[in-house]
Amino acid sequence: MREKDFISIIKSTLDSEYIGDDCAYLKDLGIVVTQDNLVEDVHFLSNSITPFQLGYKSVMVNISDVCASGGAIKYLTVGLSVPDNVDGNFIKEFYEGAKTACGGFAEIVGGDVTLSDKIFVSVCAIGKTQGCKISSRKNAKTGYKVVVSGVHGSSSAGLKLILNGKKEPENLIKAHLMPKAQVEFCRQIAQNVSVDYAMMDTSDGLMDALSTIANESGVLLEIDFDKIPCVDVLKQFDDWQNLVLFGGEDYGIIAVIPESLNCGGIVIGRVKDGLGVDLILNGKVLHYSKKDVEEKIFNHFKKD
């Protein structure tokens, strides 16, 4: 089973209208809420990431979800479980990294610390919605443009380097260990758009975000691969195109918005009648169904 299969079961069991997007939008309270877990040997290797970097990344991935929802990040709680051989320096550096990720626009207001066999981090993030229009993955409309913010492929390339014991190129490794949420890009959209729109972060890969929005909205996204931003050094990898499309944890943003809205970012495609994703690559049009994409994206629940 895949993560989305688990989510589908949980959503139907709880009969909840809130589950499914990057955040739960609690309209009556004027907030959006999200939670992400990072587990040692699943999401990170303890010998390849510093406590500072782990704290930073744990917070930043939650900030990304709040921003992708259209909310303005405000507060976080951080739960940290560690083995009994972890010392005070680890704890101090971890929370210094977490505080740095907050960047002055968010505050850690609580959490929990416990013992466990492995390092486990659970972060809850809360964003306010006043003055913001909240996004939904179901709101892509025919005639809208597809805009991306952030480069893609760098994080998965950085992970490859780490797993192979490499320390360069440094910018690729940093992209994996210390990603940056697209805070300002999302803010510009959420505070200036006046109609329904779709937005999602690319934590599980660019194609995952495109396919999810297309299928939940019931539309076809036509994407020009040559317009997708990536760093030049990425092209030293034989599978660089695959890294751009299916590599995860770049924490870029896909926004599907009206043609008239100017918000920065790079236009990589348009919304048309149909279903799925049409990718223009090397002069050919490749169609990806929901199933095609799900077979290629990273699966946290699969053990090799």
Image (cartoon, rainbow, N blue to C red):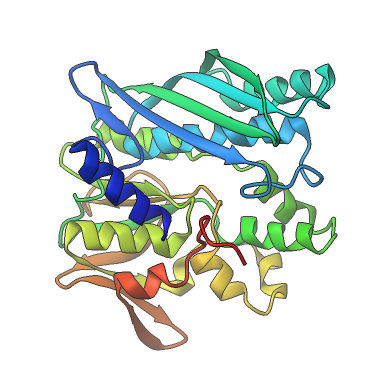
> In the figure, is residue 146 to the left or right of 183?
left
Q: Position of residue 251 (x, y in %)?
A: 51, 47
Residue 153 position by quadrant: bottom right
Give the quadrant of the C terminus. bottom right
Provide residue 253's location: percent of width, then percent of height: 43, 49
Q: Is residue 20 visible?
A: no
Relative depth, front residue between 52 and 47: 47
Taking the spot 36% from the left edge, 83% from the top edge, the residue there is 286
211, 9: nearer the viewer: 9
- Expressed as whole percent of the image width and height from the top left, the position of residue 140 reads 21, 54
* Picture residue at 26% right of the left edge, 70% below the top: 276
**The N terminus lies in quadrant:** bottom left
Residue 199 in the image: state x and y as whole percent: 32, 47
At a point 72% along the width and 35% down the height, the residue shown is 53
Give above or below for 133 relative to 103. Answer: below
Q: Is residue 33 visible?
A: yes
Number of marks drawn: 0
Q: Residue furthest top?
A: 109
Between 81 and 43, the residue placed more toward the observer is: 81
Query: Image quadrant of residue 28?
Result: top left
In the rendered view, does 227 fall on the left or right side of 250? left
Figure check: 280 above or below 216? below
- The residue depicted at 50 percent of the width and 60 percent of the height is 299
Residue farthest front in this picture: 117
Residue 51 falls left or right of residue 40: right
Q: Is 158 drawn above or below residue 128 in the view shown?
A: below
